[in-house]
Image (spheres, helix red, strand yellow):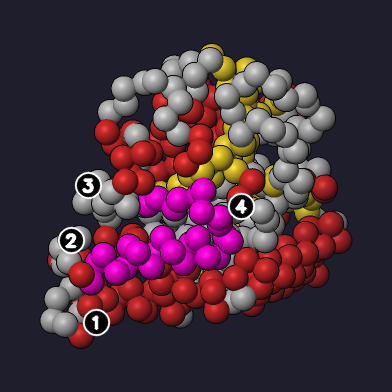
Amino acid sequence: MKKYNFSAGPSTLPEEVIQQAAQAVLDFNNNGTSLIEISHRSKDFIAIMDEARSLAKKLMKLDDHHEVLYLQGGASLQFTMIPYNLLKSKAAYIDSGNFASVAIKEAEKIGKIEVLASSKQDKYTYIPKGYTIPSDVDYLHITSNNTVYGTEIKTFPETDVPIVCDMSSDILSRSIDYNKFAISYAGAQKNLGPAGVTMVVVDKRYLGITGRNLPSYLDYEVHIAKESMANTPPVFAVYTTLLNLRWLEKQGGTEGIEKKNKVKAELLYNEIDRNPLFRGVCEKEDRSLMNVCFFLNDEEKYKAKFDQMWKDANIVGVGGYRTVGGYRASIYNAMPLEGVQALVNVMKELEKTA
Ligand code: PMP
């Protein structure tokens, strides 16, 4: 029986997407070849890439200033590409979690960085707010969802400074104004598809201003000109992402999925708050719809029992991040409500038998 997979990424994908991807690997479009052995220059694959770009644009309601790119190197390579492409004199960063802090360290290798606010001193249990954005910075870098700590930006900063946003763990999970960002980016392996491809949404108006002679692969303008085919793209990851985007469209796009994501998150947070054996980790107003972090109040007494119970309930992947401990249930778009209900049932059962 298929398990309920709460892993933070790579993570659960819709069953129909996995079936379709598996079929395409065996025989793509009944044409006697596998998806992973056709040329990326073939008509079939060019059509896949075109649809993957245009459907992402449609789902995010992007205007014509924005281009959707499918690149490699993970979100981690974006930590470098962003300052290479945009940083001329100084950039501002918000330190809201461990990936935000890695983004800062990488950018500091390239130019001058000002960290405007940090919640590190409070173990990243909230989203920093109320900071002033200097008008002379080239861009402001934020992280919309902090995968490890389970916090999420609900209201984005209002500023004339270009905003760059790491959306690795909540892209396309909610209806927001995606045109707001100069760059937004996400490794696919959480809400988009399998590992191996990174979606980068670029507002072309902010490119070509640093005067840097960039290595070709690190230059967004090269990828825009070559329509994400500057080198061999990861064909399987792009195709499976496209299948997932088609699935998302059938869910009613970002509006439809946001409603479902809110129901799932509320069910789980309500149980964490109600059940005396558990406690949440983060400020309630900043709680993520995607990564729900919680602790047992008495680990020594209940951990072994709880762990056995969720394993018996067909659940995997709820262990907390290695440096944080406790539990983290990642409830991305593809996690069905039944999966969340199964976890909540286990929490209730633990209380009953405690
Ligand atoms: N940013 C965030 C918010 C993440 O959660 C992750 C991965 N967990 C990364 C960046 C790094 O992504 P990748 O592994 O694709 O380089």
Give me the C-alpha separation between circle 3 and circle 4.
Answer: 27 Å
**What amino acid does circle 2 point to?**
Arg
Does the magenta run of residues contain 311? no
Residue indicated by mark 1: 29
Give me the C-alpha separation between circle 1 and circle 2.
Answer: 17 Å
Label 1 secondary element: helix
| Front residue of this view, candidates 19 and 32 | 32
**What amino acid does circle 1 point to?**
Asn
**What amino acid does circle 3 point to?**
Asn
Farthest residue toward the bottom?
A: 30
Residue indicated by mark 2: 41
> Which residues, given as a range, are shown in magenta?
44-72
Label 1 environment density (alpha carbons within 10 Å; few <14, some 14–19, many ≥20): few
Q: Earlier in the sequence, mark 3 or mark 4?
A: 4
| Front residue of this view, candidates 217 and 241 | 217
Does the magenta run of residues contain 69? yes
Label 4 secondary element: helix
**What amino acid does circle 4 point to?**
Tyr
